[in-house]
Image: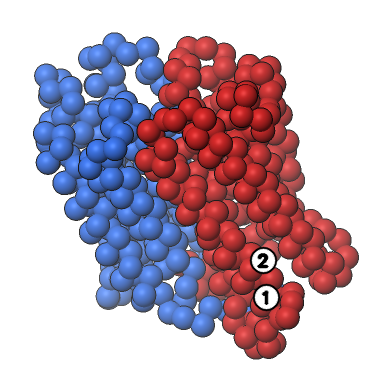
Chain colours: A blue, B red
Amino acid sequence: MARNRGGGRFQMSATPALVLAQIFAAAAITLMLVWILHFRGGVSLKAKNLQRLLNAHHVLMLFGPIISTGQAIMAFKTIPGRRKVRKLIHMLLNLAGLILGVLGLYAIFKFYSEVNEPADLHSLHSWTGIGVMGLYVIQFFLGFSFFLFPGAQKNMRTDMKPWHAFFGLVIFILAVFTSGTGLIQRFRFLNLLKEREAYVLNFTGIAIILFGIAVVMSVVLP
Amino acid sequence: MARNRGGGRFQMSATPALVLAQIFAAAAITLMLVWILHFRGGVSLKAKNLQRLLNAHHVLMLFGPIISTGQAIMAFKTIPGRRKVRKLIHMLLNLAGLILGVLGLYAIFKFYSEVNEPADLHSLHSWTGIGVMGLYVIQFFLGFSFFLFPGAQKNMRTDMKPWHAFFGLVIFILAVFTSGTGLIQRFRFLNLLKEREAYVLNFTGIAIILFGIAVVMSVVLP
């Protein structure tokens, strides 16, 4: 609100936010891998390994809708080169985020179909998770058709750009929110209290939140 | 990111976002009251009523750090009158949000001290909750001293404004995030699956998220 009055602008470049984002991304990935590999026995997409299927859901969702999407958002500021190249990399990173997200959905649906748990699709996590994936798909195809191929008219693109950026950020923040609720559900599910593992899990969540804030900051700063 | 290039600006006023925010706020409050009063037996700050103490935590946090803070953020666009009046109302709504938040913290600490549960302060919800309250207190006092009393120099205020607005939004989004994780914890704690109550609880969470998005949108739109 303040930015619209008196011309107050940020007296700082986006560089520190971009650097912080990479540090928090590395921290989140490291903590997630320590958790999954050291405490939880690794990942698998085969139905025989139920716990590893659940682990695969966590890992895929972190690398996809969180890390890849965050990198896609920052690509316009991190990737050197022409604008066309940046746009292409932005699209490819989002595509990677989307594919990993769909695989992550596959892993969790497979898990629930194996355990026959009635909790299937009853949690807020599942609601926002499926909602955010749906919005992500729509956002991707709208962005692709407007800005890449076939591409809309110049003035229409100019009108759409801030909306594309805004809803992209909203979807990303919702993904961060959803990953936090997912970690909390696993926390409760495992009933891990007072254990070292609980701290690894919580710090993974904190690292993801800080990554999210840094990504948003890198967009807002000039 | 797109807004910094080619001058693409939002071709829409903030009014629809402000209206939507009030609708989602009303929905969240109604659903929360239905949940707490109809399904959960009301609120109390007395230690004898353990469940009502927990209920009080939910209600206080919704009315304080979510609704009051959200209204405070929108006050610059919803309140008619001079800028000084708006600033004062912005401060008072934040003060209300802060006081209700502190009471909400009191309720949950009292609850845990009564039940002697070892889960005390081990969840991601408690970490981000206490973190966000700490940041909120700092943000309030910095804002108060820079923009109200004693007030910083004009050019310093202009430099600070976008940061104040940005971190205010970050704190608000973190509060929305934390309330979602809190609802999920209660959901798991109560083990309510396949019941009507579960839907009331989830839709409360959805209403809070939509309120959060509408508030952020009202700030971004001109």
Measured Cα–Cα span from mark 1 to mark 2:
19 Å
Give me the residue at 12% from left, 40% from top: A37
Give me the residue at 51% from left, 82% from top: A11
Vertically, is A2 above or below A102? below
Give me the residue at 36% from left, 75% from top: A16
Q: Is residue A69 visible?
A: no
The residue that label 2 is drawn on is: A1
Residue A111, picture quadrant = top left
**Image quarter hosting the N terminus of chain A:** bottom right
Q: Amino acid at mark 1?
A: Ser
* Label 1 in the same subunit as label 2: no
Horizontal placement of B12 versus B127: left or right?
right
Horizontal placement of A137 versus B26: left or right?
left
Q: Secondary structure at mark 2?
A: loop
Q: Nearer the viewer, residue A136 or B207?
A: B207
Residue B145: assigned label: 1
Q: Chain of mark 2?
A: A
Q: Chain of mark 1?
A: B
